[in-house]
Image (tube, helix red, strand yellow):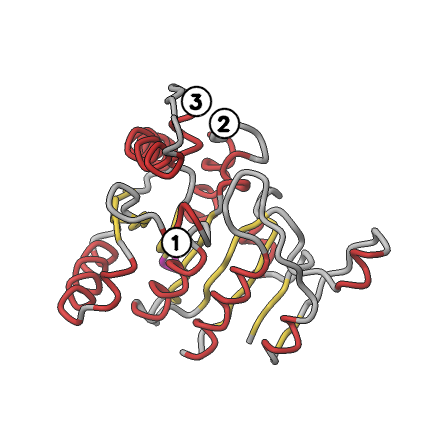
Amino acid sequence: MAKKRILLKIGTNTLTRETNHISRGKIEDIGMQIAALNEDYEFIIVSSGAIAAAKQFVKLESKGREIVVKQALASIGQPHLMRIFHENFSDLGLLTSQCLLSYSDFEKEQSKVNIVNTINVLIENNYIPIINENDTVATDEIQFGDNDKLAALAAVLLKVDILIIATNTNGIYTKSSIHDSTPETITLVKDIKSLQKEVGDTKSSQGTGGMQSKIEAAAIAKAANIETWVVNGLNDNFILNALKNKIPFTKIT
């Protein structure tokens, strides 16, 4: 039986557990779940967090060049982020690899072929590809979607079975329940347009995304018949529990 392929997108708020530091415990939690699911699933990770990783070590002066400084922070933080993944995953017997992509890579046929070939070889040899945007040369993720769109494009290109977007809420809430301060998860969505009416345009505290960017990512995946799950990644075992339907989350079919 072929393994099912999951693309897991991890936002900065999840990786930091809503603090100012990358959480080794959260990365270990993710690794333990991947190890537990290794017999039936293969994983590709799209990870934010490079800028947050850098901020633990350095403070750069901006002088009106905020985007350039964020690009520099991403450059500093990316190897630290990968080191944390490597250290925690290797303790669990998991192998990791780094893939830096830009949105322009998805517009060139040869680049797309190269991405698919490289990542498939990595997976065949039991390496977990960890994708991030190449922030040194691109600013889209920094300015806009916190890797949500990148994750969706990669999910389509790599023909995954499920796109899991780990965030800091129990999925997408109904607008009325948020207004009443009693958040209620929308568990199943078949019509993306109806979902658009339920969300605002707020951004996350650490990342640059928000529910709007997640819905846009889900729409890209849906067009390729890929399910998107929006799951609370702050909770331990969130992947395992979502697969067993033990927790509230939003499934977009």
Residue 215 location, x and y as percent?
Answer: 55, 66
Question: Which one is in front, 154 or 133?
Answer: 133
SS for dot 1: loop
Location of mark 3 (residue)? 56
Based on the displayed image, in which of its 4 quarters is residue 48 positioned?
top left
Residue 40 in magenta stretch: yes
Residue 102 location, x and y as percent?
Answer: 27, 55
SS for dot 3: loop
Question: Which one is in front, 189 or 181?
Answer: 181
Question: Do the CB atoms of the residues marked 2 and 3 lie less than 8 Å apart?
Answer: yes
Residue drawn at the location 39% of the way across and 57% of the way down: 39
In the image, residue 223 above or below residue 57? below
Residue drawn at the location 57% of the way across and 47% of the way down: 233
- What separation in Å lies between label 1 and label 3 (alpha carbons)? 32 Å
Residue drawn at the location 57% of the way across and 59% of the way down: 230
SS for dot 2: loop
Residue 188 vs residue 19: left or right? right
**Local crowd size for mark 3, using a 10 Å CA cut-off: few (<14), some (14–19), many (≥20):** few
Segment tinted magenta in the rendering: 38-42
The amino acid type, in three-letter code, at marker 1 is Asn
Q: How many marks?
A: 3
Mark 1 vs mark 2: in front: 2
The amino acid type, in three-letter code, at marker 3 is Gln
* Figure quadrant of the N terminus: bottom left
Residue 213 in magenta stretch: no
In the image, residue 174 above or below residue 70? below
Location of mark 2 (residue)? 21
Q: Which mark is residue 38?
A: 1
Question: Which one is in front, 45 or 210?
Answer: 210
* Figure quadrant of the C terminus: bottom right
Q: Residue furthest right?
A: 180
